[in-house]
Each structure stands twice: as C-alpha cells, then as structure tokens.
C-alpha cells in the first residue's frame, strides 16, 4: 500500500514539474526582440492565450522624419497608420516548443505571412514566414534586446 502511495505522490510531483517547465519555456519568448536588421524592436507578449507582437522602437536615421507610416500596405486605407505600436505578430499558440498558427505582417513589403516562432537559445528567436503553401518560406533570426 505504501509503495502505491509513494508512486502516486512521485507521479504528481513529476507532472507538476513538467507543467512548470513548460510554462517557463513558453514565457522565455516574452520581451523585446530586435528584427534581423536591428532597425526595429518588437515586444512579444501573451494576449488572450495567444502570442502578440508590437513594434515598440524604430531606428531613425532621418532626423527630419518623426513618424514612420505603413506606406507599402496592400490595403490603401491602412497606409496612414503609424508603424510605432503596430501589431505585426498575432494568433500564435504554443505547441511542443514552437509557437505556430498565427500571422506576421512585414511592413517593408506590405505582406502578411503565416508564421512560426521557435526559441533556439535564450537570446535567439527563429522566425519562419510562409506565403501560401509551406514550400514558399523565409526564415530569419531575431535577437533579444539586452536589458
């Protein structure tokens, strides 16, 4: 009887630690990340159970220009919106180490892609965008912004 109780307690502790490790690995993606060119920072956070990413910083090499607009958007009615604060990642859900099932908007091309994110190292995020079928894809790396 004691062996059965011990095994039950051990199993519960093991399940608790597994859930805790998953929660910790999911949250490691949260925070600010530089895009590949380091011209923007994207703040990644959780919103309503899915991942959300917003532009929170833009490199400004033109002191004359204060506001950057979404001028290449395919939808002409959205071309006057500012890039600062723009949501570019949304709808991603965590599954076995990969955030997937969402979309990423590229303000340089005006295109929206299906995407997946995977944390490769604590400060390296792999971002894969898919246009249409998954055979047309692009993979880039984002680096964590140092505090």
Image (cartoon, rainbow, N blue to C red):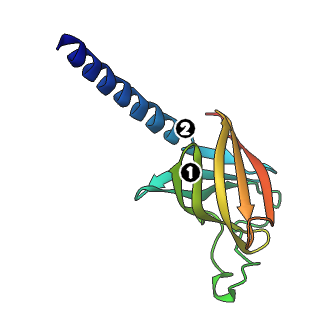
Count of numbered circles in the view: 2
Q: Position of residue 133 (x, y in %)?
A: 74, 71
Residue 71 image-quadrant placement: bottom right
| Tag 2 residue | 28
In the depicted structure, whether residue 11 falls above or below residue 63? above
> Can the viewer see residue 63?
no
Crowd tier of the residue under label 1, counting other residues whose Cα lies within 10 Å: few below 14, some 14–19, many 20 or above: many
Q: Nearer the viewer, residue 37 or 52?
A: 52
Q: Which residue is found at the position 44% from the left and 38% from the top?
A: 23
Q: Position of residue 99 (x, y in %)?
A: 58, 52
Q: Quadrant of the N terminus?
A: top left
Q: Is mark 1 in CB contact (under 8 Å) with mark 2?
A: no
Classify residue 11 as left or right of residue 70.
left
Q: Nearer the viewer, residue 62 or 50?
A: 50
Q: Quadrant of the C terminus?
A: top right
Q: Pick out the residue farthest to the front.
A: 1
Distance from disc 1 to disc 2, alpha carbons, whole Å, reads 10 Å
| Tag 1 residue | 44
Q: Secondary structure at mark 1?
A: strand
In the depicted structure, whether residue 37 falls above or below residue 75? above
Classify residue 127 as left or right of residue 2.
right
Classify residue 115 as left or right of residue 25.
right
Q: Position of residue 117 (x, y in %)?
A: 64, 51
Q: Which residue is found at the position 75% from the left and 70% from the top?
A: 131
């Amino acid at each position: 009887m004691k062996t059965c109780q011990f095994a039950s307690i051990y199993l519960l502790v093991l399940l608790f630690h597994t859930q805790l490790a998953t929660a910790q690995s999911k949250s490691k993606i949260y925070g600010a990340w530089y895009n590949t060119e380091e011209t923007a920072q994207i703040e990644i956070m959780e919103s309503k159970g899915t991942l959300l990413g917003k532009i929170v910083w833009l490199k400004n090499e033109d002191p004359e220009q204060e506001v950057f607009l979404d001028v290449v958007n395919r939808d002409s009615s959205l071309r006057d919106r500012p890039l600062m604060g723009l949501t570019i990642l949304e709808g991603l859900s965590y599954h076995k180490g990969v955030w997937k099932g969402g979309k990423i908007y590229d303000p340089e091309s005006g295109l929206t892609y299906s995407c997946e994110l995977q944390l490769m190292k604590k400060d390296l995020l792999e971002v894969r965008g898919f246009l249409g079928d998954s055979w047309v894809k692009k993979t880039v790396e984002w680096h964590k912004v140092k505090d």
